[in-house]
Image (cartoon, rainbow, N blue to C red):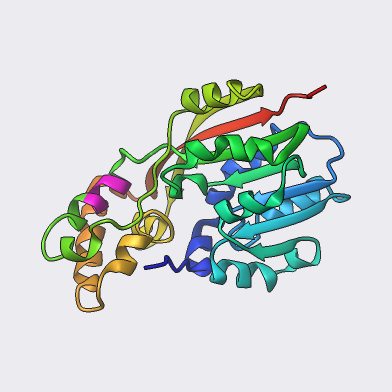
């Protein structure tokens, strides 16, 4: 089953989701890039910030989701960004070596279990002296993820959720060493944001737009409501609201690498 993304649900916490992107791009020191690509551009709201940063560059947003590309193409960002639907791996296979000055991937690589093996291809797509920057979640051991996995493994849900996509990422050191081995200068770090979420079942709203979405989509209509109700209850216990909002710790792993200048 292919995963169907919901741009509206994903944008429910657009400001919070956008903070890591801003911190990532802020560490890219490219001055006047000609070609900038956002791999996993989603609905395009963050890709438009690349056009603000480098207004003279040709900027492309790539995403595998039809719904996300439609939303991006219908947004104001489409006036300055070309949006293209493609699987990240297919794009890498066809882009050709050294074609991109700045290659950005925000909260996307974690959906590809083999993404560490793709690092050489990502670097290869960047021009000598160019920039590769990505960030991935580092909170997969937190209740926001583990409670979903535990519930999905129980009957009657397990028969439908076994093998569904689940995000996975490595620590900053793993990425740093992999990129150093390819001759890159690497800046890697981790940040834990403390997002204060408000509203009814805000943590469920958060995870249902990203990490929990494949599980929810895999469930049949007659089982999904009960699963959602139980997951909401478990998340409320794990993330209580004391009247001042729910605190969601949100750990992210960042990597900014400059490729070597070859003779």
Q: Nearer the viewer, residue 98 or 244?
A: 98
Q: Position of residue 23 (x, y in %)?
A: 63, 37
Q: Residue at x 60, y 45 (%)?
A: 105
Q: Is residue 160 above or below residue 146?
A: below
Q: Nearer the viewer, residue 239 or 88?
A: 88
Q: Residue at x 58, y 46 (%)?
A: 106
The answer to whether residue 23 is visible is: no
Q: Nearer the viewer, residue 117 or 145?
A: 117
In the picture, measured across the screen, residue 14 lies left or right of residue 124, that is left
Q: Residue at x 71, y 28 (%)?
A: 259
In the picture, measured across the screen, residue 261 lies left or right of residue 123, that is right
Q: Position of residue 93 (x, y in %)?
A: 62, 50
User: Main structural element of the magenta stretch: helix, strand or loop?
Assistant: helix
Q: Residue at x 83, y 41 (%)?
A: 33
Q: Position of residue 6 (x, y in %)?
A: 48, 68
Quadrant for the C terminus, please: top right
Q: Is residue 18 above or below residue 63?
A: above
**Badge count:** 0
- Magenta segment: does it hold 148? yes
- Residues shaded magenta: 144-149
- Magenta segment: does it hold 167? no
Quadrant for the N terminus, please: bottom left
Looking at this view, name the residue that lies furthest to the left: 155
The answer to whether residue 43 is visible is: yes
Q: Is residue 113 above or below residue 12?
A: above
């Amino acid at each position: 089953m292919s995963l169907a993304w919901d741009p509206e649900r994903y944008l429910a916490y657009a400001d919070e989701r956008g903070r890591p992107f801003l911190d990532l791009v802020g560490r890219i020191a490219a001055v006047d890039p000609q070609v900038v690509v956002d791999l996993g551009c989603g609905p395009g709201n963050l890709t438009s910030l690349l056009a603000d940063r480098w207004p003279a560059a040709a900027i492309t947003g790539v995403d595998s989701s039809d719904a996300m590309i439609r939303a991006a193409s219908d947004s104001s960002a489409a006036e300055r960004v070309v949006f293209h639907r493609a699987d990240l791996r297919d794009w890498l296979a066809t882009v050709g070596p050294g074609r991109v000055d700045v290659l950005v991937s925000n909260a996307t690589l974690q959906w590809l279990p083999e993404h560490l093996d793709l690092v050489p291809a990502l670097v290869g797509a960047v021009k000598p002296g160019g920039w590769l920057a990505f960030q991935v979640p580092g909170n997969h051991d937190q209740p926001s993820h583990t409670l979903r996995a535990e519930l999905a493994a129980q009957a009657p849900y397990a028969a439908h959720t076994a093998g569904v996509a689940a995000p996975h990422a490595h620590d900053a050191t793993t990425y740093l060493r992999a990129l150093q081995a390819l001759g890159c200068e690497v800046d890697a770090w981790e940040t834990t944001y403390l997002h204060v979420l408000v509203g009814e079942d805000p943590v469920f709203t958060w995870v249902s737009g990203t990490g929990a979405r494949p599980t929810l989509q895999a469930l049949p209509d007659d089982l999904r409501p009960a699963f959602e109700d139980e997951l909401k209850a478990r998340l409320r216990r794990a993330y209580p609201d004391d009247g001042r909002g729910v605190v969601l710790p949100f750990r992210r792993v960042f990597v900014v690498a400059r490729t070597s200048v070859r003779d």
